Amino acid sequence: MSLNLLNEFGIAFLETAWMLTISVTLAVLIGIPLGIGLFVTSEGMFWQNKILQNISGTIINIIRSIPFVILLVVLLPLTTFILGTSMGPTAASLSLTVAGIPFYARLVENSLREIDKGVIEAAESCGASPWLIIRKVLLPESKSGLIAGLTVTIISLLSYSAMAGMIGGGGIGDLAIRFGYYRYQNEVMVMTVVFLIFLVQLIQFIGDRAAHAADKR
Amino acid sequence: MIELVNVTKTYNSVTAVDNVNLTIPKGEIFGIIGYSGAGKSTLLRCLNLLEKPTAGQVLINKKDLTALSKTEVRKERLKIGMIFQHFHLISSAKVYDNIAFSMLAAGKTKDEIQLRVPELLEMVGLADRADHYPAQLSGGQKQRVGIARALANDPTVLLCDEATSALDPNTTASILKLLKEINVSLGITIVLITHEMEVVQQICHRVAVMENGKVIEVNEAYELFADPQTPLAKQFVQTVHSLTLPERLLKARTGSIAQITFRGDSAEDSIISETISRFKVTVNILHGQISYIQDRPLGILIVEIKGNQSEIERAIEYITIRTNRLEVLADVS
């Protein structure tokens, strides 16, 4: 492999890492509260609220049903408005974030549903406030599921990020398309795919380990 | 003291608790017994408003919980501990933190918690388990943690939701013993629901029998065993006095078969021998058992009385007067 290509590859990796760092961080920071919100407003929970539940559920479903390629394009005006540009990895991060938040929020909601309702009931019977229950019961009890969901989210966003090339976002996936597909350099294609496989395996491995360690059941 | 006034709970069109009135004095161990689906679990949850009654009032220490706001109800719950069949401990928290949770709910400081949790662990016999996760404990130990958590804020009432139903007989006995000790040493009122008569037999002072959401009988525990008033209560009592006779015996009988219940210290032997000497009958003992309800003996004897019809009738009348309770299971044919 030429030095030049290696250099390209290094840049592409950093771009991917940058996009994932931003989008995953924001997906976690916003997705967890949103997922908790979805859960505690569901039927039978302490902040049961059908209207709020329906509205947020619908918005999440709408965003999740838009294919990422289209989301990327649809969000261009918003990206320009917020970042002043619609090009580059940071711009692509915004779309990844928008896709990642509802994705992770649903996974958070699901792992909260896994918690034995009796444990929540017991906490309520202790006279605990909703905030205390969220902090000391819901989050710790779903920790393993939250980590597993995070793993899935990171891997999904990694695969989404391949499309970021469309708006000049760069990244490993983009490299594969530009060199491997457009320039018929099959070895570049193979190399990036092998690298992505390795990366996904690694993320999954670490995620599984962490999820297992957090599970005290 | 706990008072339920016309408490009703309906879900859509299903009435789970139907117009229940109960008064449970301070310091009593009160049992609620019934088959699953009878509404006893819902009724228990009405006591700390985990279920808000559709109608009626729940008064705990003269305060009507149904009239309070959510925040005020939470405050009252600090004084009402609850334990569960499946323990419901926080699996990701150590034993120490499970108990501390309850105190955090009460707004206690870290120092207060550090002082109190070891005390509670000592009381339930788990002093060396503070750093264990629930998954590392046996069922009985988990329930002890549940009890410690429930007692952390010095409640006046302890609600037990089938607290021993998931435990083996030995562990059940030790948990019941602990509950009894707590009741005596702390003067705490205990309300428990169960479908196991052994629980009632061992610790309850009084019992309510529930069927289809209604309380159909309220009785002293001893009286419930000695003289159940409703068919359902009789059924439950029979699960403890498993005095079933072999079919062969019933077929081969020539006299009347009667079940005699002896209360307390009534001298059973002499009643039988007096009957034999007074009337021209023979009495053949087929089956017998003495159970202890709260340490008071209750004897049950199944006898076959033989003789001519009128002598048998007189003998039965005599025993009935002497013992208060005789049930003819099979008449002389």
Image (cartoon, grey):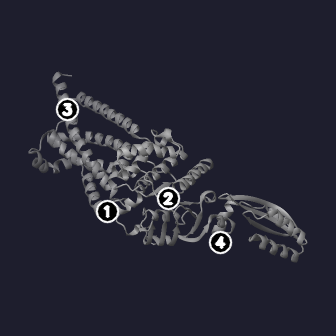
Q: Residue at x 82, y 61 (%)?
A: B286
Q: Which mark is residue A14?
A: 3
Give me the C-alpha separation between circle 4 and circle 3. 81 Å
Mark 1: amino acid: Asn
Q: Nearer the viewer, mark 2 or mark 1?
A: 2
**Residue A18's spot in the image, x, y percent?**
19, 36
Eye-nearest disc, 4 or 1: 4
Find out whether the residues at labels 3 and 2 contact each other: C-beta distance under 8 Å.
no
- The chain identifier of the residue carrying mark 1 reads A
* Residue B159 - label: 2
Placement of B319 over or under B141, stated as above or below: below
Furthest residue toward left = A84
Label 4, residues with CA under 10 Å away: few <14, some 14-19, many ≥20: some
Mark 1 is surrounded, within 10 Å at the Cα level, by few (under 14), some (14 to 19) or many (20 or more) other residues, namely some
Between the residue at mark 3 and the residue at mark 2, the CA separation in whole angstroms equals 59 Å
The reply to the same-chain question for discs 2 and 4 is: yes
Frontmost of labels 4 and 3 is: 4
Which mark is drawn over residue A49?
Answer: 1
Q: Residue at x 49, y 47 (%)?
A: B145
SS at mark 1? loop
Q: In this view of the protein, which residue sits in the foreground, B88 or B77? A: B77
